[in-house]
Image (cartoon, rainbow, N blue to C red):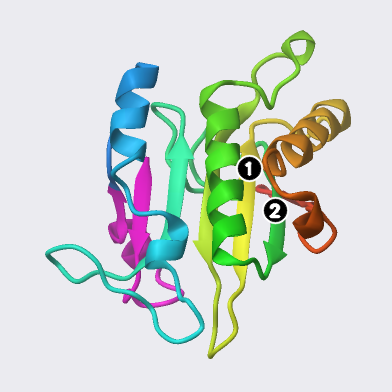
Amino acid sequence: MWKHTGGHKKGDPNAWKDSMKALCTFSTIEDFWRYFNHIPKPSEVFFDGDCQKRVGEKNEKIEEYSLFKKGIEPEWGDPRNCDGGEWFWRTNLDSDVLDLFWQNMVLGVVGETLENPALGSHVNGARVVDKSRGNYNIYKIELWIDSKDITVRDSIRTKLSEALTHGLPSHKMVRNNPKFEWKDHSS
């Protein structure tokens, strides 16, 4: 699991990479929960309409969280990412919905429930990004895969949409129904 802190020079790929720090690694479900339960939720660190929160001893602004399989970095240039792409959704979400969607996506990646076993393992990782500007909250939810195959992509998108909304009260479903778009990483 990674965090990406703010304050780096936009457009400088080296500065962006320097802002990326590993938070933890795990190999058991017990270790996953031990870490995940102590990492602040996106709503606790992302822009809330009034201010960008600062956390930790270094008073950092966290702009992204990423969870990727061991040996895969959350960047397009990683060899496991460059031949695939991502399903993404840019949206304005209430903080409780943002946290639920992030948790559900992470659990889908960890539990490998976003994949169709008949099609193989293709999910590389997930990201949640704070794209808020001014006083408007907007977040980007991404699921990165290693394939552009349309059958693989569509199967994963369907499972992702179902998993994300699990536990969402029905009165919030209409406003928060995911509308994912595809982006190739090697475009």
141 above or below 165?
below
Label 2 close to label 1 by CB (< 8 Å): yes
Query: How many numbered dots are placed on residues in this image?
Result: 2
Which secondary structure, mark 2?
strand
How far apart are the two marked residues, 2 and 1, measured between alpha carbons?
7 Å
Can residue 88 be seen at all in this image of the molecule? Answer: yes
Residue under the point 85% across and 34% down: 154
Q: Can residue 13 be seen in this view?
A: no
**Label of residue 143 in the image:** 1
Q: Which residue lies furthest to the left in this view?
A: 57
Left or right: where does residue 73 sit relative to residue 56? Answer: right
Residue type at mark 1: give it. Answer: Leu
User: Three-letter amino acid code at disc 2?
Assistant: Phe
**As drawn, is 11 to the left or to the right of 39?**
right
Q: Eyeballing the image, is 157 above or below 136? A: above
Q: Which residue is drawn at 48% across and 48% down?
A: 75
Which of the 4 image quadrants contains residue 84?
top right
